[in-house]
């Protein structure tokens, strides 16, 4: 006979159950309900109701603050024409949703499972986090669009108003972080919200410094630049949330938990003869479940209770596992369990370190190839987009070529007609990987020519927006032209890197024996 020893079944066993192993198996009770008269209930930190109520109150207060702060920052950002302030408000509003998720997770965590949802409602916070990521990515796209527009057409920003509104963010986020600091020590759910508050605090400080700079220097380009920096910070947090949510939904091994170490530790118990069929997964973001089969000597079920109690306590104290599922048996694996037999077969033939290194290297090679292909396709797509935009507006592009004042008049129209189609052809070749050596060389050459002509005009004081000279060399309208030079330099570096990685290095590798 077999007997499971926990109240939380693993997903695999919950789906179809597991047949009894061959031989006389024994089990210990672990965390069964009080109606059956068993001893334990669950493991993990137990807190008094007043402590839980205090945590809920602090989350509610933080939630209110983080709804007020972005509202003030958003209004101030529109009034002061500050994209950095608007992007900071967007980020702060994302943290309001994070606090809402934390608060509802706190409420749901106090509810028990139901006959239909035996795991309870804890994973609702994971689904809400994924929705939050989708909203944040959309907001980041809006911020990038506005920042690029401000680079091209800078607007005056009120430094005093930016500083005043950012100071509100610093005070509010600092107070919110202080409120959550105590509960963050023992709650992973609250700790995530606390880290959001610390990120907001640092972001508000950056915006405050931007306002201070604007009081003394009219560096309006600094505002959209800082907004792009904030976008990078937002997307980094989104990626972390997405990875953690995917890990939980896939029932992957929790981050920071080494299954091999847990197995080795359990095998060190004097009364344990063997350990197999080991699984660990997150029931929620802050709860770790664990299941395994423990081989012990043939004995009455009651004699395993002391051993089960010691194992459960050690799993919680050493590894933070609060929902262990322990199945005791007298022979390794049961003949009636397909999963158990597969697990044991895998354990009987472990992969060598060389095989693991080889597979890890193959994964790294595939990842590098995928990233390189994505960069190549994006580069070709942007070339294609630029050429198509010029084809749609031939007169505007012809005027732009004329404003550069490099070509003779009779070459302007032919150049305005040929160059866009050449860009489209190069973009298609790079996008789909056709004739990469020639396509990348042509793209880099075009970018080098565009950048050289632009720098030459900046040096001689020609404003390419109107095709007119200004007072002296280097004193032209530097806003749009500096942004165009920076953009073309970045594209040229991008194209050069692709040419080196996709053409030069591969050619050298083919020549090597």
Image (cartoon, rainbow, N blue to C red):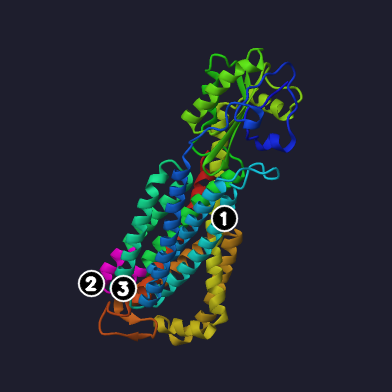
Q: Is residue 200 above or below residue 351?
A: below
Q: Is residue 393 visible?
A: yes
| Disc nearest the viewer among 3 and 2 | 3
Q: Which mark is residue 216?
A: 2
Instruction: Provide the residue designation for mark 3.
Output: 161
- Give the CA distance from mark 1 to mark 2: 44 Å
Query: Where does the magenta region start and end?
Result: 207-223
Instruction: Provide the residue designation for mark 1.
Output: 128
Q: Quadrant of the N terminus?
A: top right
**Residue positioned 59% across, 66% down in the render:** 428
The x, y position of residue 71, in whole percent, is: 42, 69
Q: Main secondary structure of the magenta part?
A: helix
Pick whichever of labels 3 and 2 is earlier in the sequence.
3
Q: Is residue 261 visible?
A: no
Dot 3 falls on a residue whose secondary structure is helix
Indicate the quadrant where residue 217 lies.
Answer: bottom left
Pick whichever of labels 3 and 1 is earlier in the sequence.
1
Q: Is residue 50 above or below residue 333?
A: below
Pick whichever of labels 1 and 2 is earlier in the sequence.
1
Q: Is residue 209 inside the magenta stretch?
A: yes
The x, y position of residue 105, in whole percent, is: 54, 50
The x, y position of residue 349, in whole percent, is: 64, 23
Q: Is residue 211 above or below residue 287?
A: below
498 or 232: nearer the eye?
232
**Residue positioned 45% across, 56% down in the render:** 60
For mark 3, does the 10 Å Cα neighbourhood hold few (<14), some (14 to 19), or many (20 or more) residues? Answer: some
**Residue positioned 47% across, 64% down in the render:** 444
């Amino acid at each position: 006979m077999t007997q499971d020893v926990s109240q939380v079944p693993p997903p695999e066993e919950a789906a179809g159950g597991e047949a009894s192993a061959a031989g006389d198996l024994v089990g210990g009770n672990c965390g069964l309900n009080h109606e059956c008269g068993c001893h334990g209930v669950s493991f993990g930190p137990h807190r008094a109701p007043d402590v839980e109520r205090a945590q809920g109150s602090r989350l509610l207060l933080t939630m209110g603050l983080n709804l007020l702060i972005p509202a003030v920052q958003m209004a101030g950002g529109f009034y002061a024409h500050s994209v950095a302030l608007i992007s900071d408000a967007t980020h702060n509003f994302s943290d309001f949703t994070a606090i809402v998720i934390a608060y509802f997770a706190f409420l749901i965590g106090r509810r028990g499972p139901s006959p239909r949802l035996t795991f309870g409602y804890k994973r609702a916070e994971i689904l809400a986090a994924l929705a939050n990521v989708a909203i944040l990515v959309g907001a980041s796209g809006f911020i990038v669009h506005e920042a690029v527009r401000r680079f091209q057409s800078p607007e005056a920003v009120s430094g005093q108003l930016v500083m005043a509104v950012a100071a509100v963010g610093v005070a509010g986020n600092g107070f919110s972080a202080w409120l959550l600091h105590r509960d963050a020590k023992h709650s992973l759910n609250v700790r995530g919200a606390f880290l959001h508050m610390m990120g907001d605090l640092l972001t508000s400080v950056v915006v405050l410094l931007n306002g201070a700079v604007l009081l003394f220097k009219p560096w309006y380009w600094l505002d959209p630049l800082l907004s792009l920096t904030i976008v990078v910070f937002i997307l980094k947090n989104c990626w972390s949330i997405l990875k953690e949510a995917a890990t939980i939904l896939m029932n992957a091994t929790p981050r920071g938990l080494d299954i091999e170490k847990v197995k080795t530790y359990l095998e060190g118990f004097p009364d344990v003869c063997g350990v197999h069929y080991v699984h660990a997964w997150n029931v929620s973001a802050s709860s770790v479940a664990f299941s395994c089969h423990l081989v012990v000597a043939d004995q009455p079920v009651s004699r395993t209770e002391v051993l089960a109690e010691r194992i459960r306590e050690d799993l919680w104290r050493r590894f933070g596992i609060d929902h262990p599922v322990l199945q005791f048996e007298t022979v390794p694996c049961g003949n009636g369990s397909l999963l158990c037999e597969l697990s044991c077969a895998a354990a009987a033939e472990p992969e060598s370190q060389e095989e693991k290194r080889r597979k890890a290297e193959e994964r790294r090679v595939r990842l590098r190839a995928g990233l390189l292909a994505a960069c190549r396709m994006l580069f070709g797509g942007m070339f294609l987009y630029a050429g198509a935009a010029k084809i749609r507006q031939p007169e505007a592009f012809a005027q732009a070529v004329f404003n550069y004042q490099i070509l003779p008049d009779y070459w302007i129209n032919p150049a305005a007609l040929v160059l866009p189609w050449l860009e489209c052809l190069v973009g298609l070749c790079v996008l789909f990987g056709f004739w990469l050596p020639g396509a990348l060389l042509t793209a880099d050459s075009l970018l080098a020519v565009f950048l050289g002509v632009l720098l030459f005009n900046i040096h001689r004081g020609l404003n390419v927006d109107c095709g007119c000279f200004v007072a002296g060399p280097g004193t032209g309208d530097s806003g749009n032209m500096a942004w165009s030079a920076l953009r073309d330099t970045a594209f040229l570096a991008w194209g050069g890197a692709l040419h080196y990685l996709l053409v030069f290095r591969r050619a050298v590798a083919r020549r090597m024996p």
